[in-house]
Amino acid sequence: MRLDNVSIDGLDDFDRKILHVISTNARITVTDLAQKIGLSKTPCHARLKRLENEGYILGYRALIDPVRLGLDHIAFVEVKLSDTRAKALSEFNTAVIGLAEVEQCHMIAGGFDYLLKVRTPNIADYRRLLGETLSALPHVSQTSTYVSMEAVKETTVLE
């Protein structure tokens, strides 16, 4: 995602530079960050804290390689629900949030209701998860699976 052409109230070029730099290296010191963006340390630190307090920065975490942990299999799953009223959506959302294998869950406007990104060690484990867990989630009426053969681009780094 590029920030240079995005109009966001309250963010100037320094703020955008801070977000870009920490999205690529969250462990950078404030001193080094200030030097990279062309500010002195104190105003840079104040801006960083403001971006955190205002919710632009949600947190900091390590990126773990799931393949090194044996989680090589990625499937994208279209989910259609039998009921899309608020209570049914809430029940589905609550249930899917509790599944460690589901890396992402997005409600979709289109021919199905949700798109899930699911990661498992292999196709057999995915098949078991689909049959025993995903299909049994509240209000699920139909699923369609698309297996990823290769991740060409996977990033959340701001450019």
Image (tube, rainbow, N blue to C red):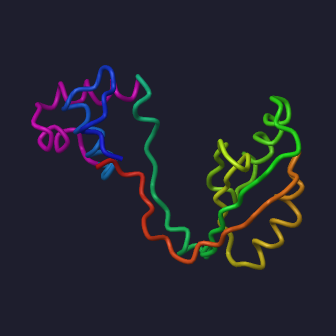
Q: Is residue 38 part of the magenta span, yes or no? A: yes
Q: Is residue 86 left or right of residue 49?
A: right
Residue under the image location 35 percent in, 28 percent down: 51
Residue 53, how many percent across, how many down?
Answer: 41, 23
Residue under the image location 49 percent in, 70 percent down: 151
Residue under the image location 41 percent in, 23 percent down: 54
Q: Nearer the viewer, residue 157 or 80?
A: 80
The magenta span reads: 28-53
Residue 104, how many percent across, how many down?
Answer: 62, 52
The secondary structure that most of the magenta stretch takes on is helix
Residue 114, how many percent across, how many down?
Answer: 71, 48
Rendered view: 59 above or below 49: below
Q: Nearer the viewer, residue 11 or 57?
A: 11
Residue 70 location, quadrant: bottom right
Q: Is residue 39 part of the magenta span, yes or no? A: yes
Rendered view: 17 above or below 64: above
Residue 52, how many percent across, how many down?
Answer: 39, 29
Rendered view: 2 above or below 145: above
